[in-house]
Amino acid sequence: MSQHVGYIVKIEHLRPHTNADRLQIATIFGNDVIVDLNVAIGDIGVYFPSDLQLSKEFCERNDLVRRKDENGNPCGGYLDPDKRNIRPIKLRGEKSDGLYLPIKCLEYTQGRLKIGDRIDVVNGHEICCKYIPVIKNKTSSKTKKCNKVRKHTAPVAPLFIEHADTEQLNYNLDAFKAGDQIEITLKMHGTSNRVAYVPVLKKFKRTLFDRILGREGKPIYEYDYISGTRRTVFDSFDGSFYGSNAFRKQFEDRLRGKLYKGEEVYFEIVGFTDAGTPIMPIGDNNKVGKDFVKQYGEKTVFSYGCAPNDKDLPQSEMYVYSMTMTNEEGNVVEYSPDFMRYRCEQMGVKCVPVFAKATIDCEGVHIYAPDNELYGFVHETDNVGDTVKLVAEKYYDGPDPIGKTHVREGVVVRIINRPKFCAYKTKNFSFKVIEGIIKDSAQEPDIEEAQELLTENKEEINV
């Protein structure tokens, strides 16, 4: 199942809206959600997080989209009939992050649901999916131009492994246990990249029978460097959603000759393309609030200390967040964060900034600075996960610590004592509002989200 789902929940916390008598605030997964006065403690319903798109059928069944009556007057719901997306908003001074509906909204599916269920499809009825803007007559043409399905069946690089998805912290608080060691790092808003030194397909060795039968023959692999995004593999650095992937090539070049056989580096590229275009879309801050505009200006440019035309600043930069070693049998070993930073120091590349390290015990969470000096302690709340969430929220908001010109996206909380990569992300409300505004005015989808849409249930795609 996708991680972009709705959740069957029980209402446990309600408080009055501070500036609207007919509304109240429910707290669901730590998020404030505005609901009407019909909602009561103990009610069971479905919570849809922000950045989801509700299906057309679900919206029609529950009269959720905007429409007009026979006289042309507005009636019905409040969602855009084409987008049907959920995004965080402020309503009369109160935050609302997500959508809550009573469980009866799913009666038409005849599904047998219980508290804790995650839903995207129920009894064959699509309910929701990740919201990815699709601009008619634009995305499709670009997609065809810069993506093509490989014609041969042998994989280009079978040991070039996609990175594990990072799920949301708020929905995975039970993953944390006493005895865990965690690390909190900056979540950066850029485009993902990966580079590896692994066996890469070079040619096919064809016998006479292969030629007679029209077969490809035996694939021949040699160790070489290969690059890609989170979901794709590059054939070249020409053509992309950015017009060109040339700005990525410098980072493969930076790693060439420095990786051991089987090493793969996962990193975020931030800043600007070689043409001076921001890698991530610019956001309008005016809808976030006057205080936010006063602090960050009217526009958010996710620059991270980079600049499009400044001889003293880079146009773009890479920040490593994970490294692995894969042997010839395909067994993957995840580097610990400390060893990853050691290798990055050897190679002369940057890692994502670390805010804090922490250990969990039966009393709570002991917080350490990156240099391992103890400087904080958070007592146990209802459970370990809630305590970790409180610690993460100490760092997930505020100015970007690198360039200090825009709000940070959030943080990633990684459990470093697990044998496999285990990390969870959480974003702050202001960033989510900006992200929603950007998507609503998008002229084309985010590159990685578009690639996710393209590759879902399809063959490997090269760019």
Image (tube, rainbow, N blue to C red):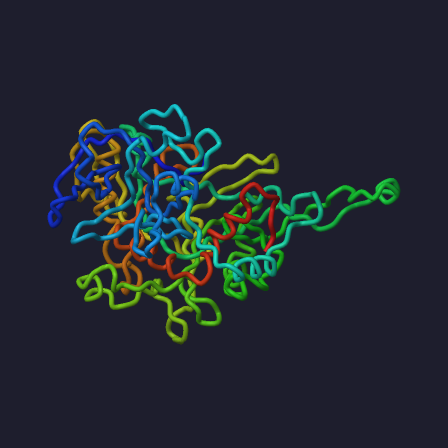
- Compare residues 127 and 28 and report the one nearer the observer: 127
x and y percentages locating residue 147 in the rendered image: 60, 56
x and y percentages locating residue 374 in the rendered image: 19, 42
Count of numbered labels shown in the rendering? 0
Residue lying furthest front: 71
Is 26 located above or below residue 430 in the figure?
above
Hey, which quadrant is residue 389 in on the image? Answer: top left
Q: Residue at x 26, y 54 (%)?
A: 430
Q: Residue at x 39, y 43 (%)?
A: 54
- 130 sits left or right of 235 in the view: left
Q: Which quarter of the rendered picture does the C terminus lie within?
A: bottom right
Q: Residue at x 23, y 45 (%)?
A: 393
- 237 sits left or right of 17 in the view: right
x and y percentages locating residue 129 in the rendered image: 43, 42
Hey, which quadrant is residue 104 in on the image? Answer: top left
- Compare residues 147 and 352 and report the one nearer the observer: 147
Q: Residue at x 29, y 54 (%)?
A: 433
- 206 sits left or right of 184 in the view: right
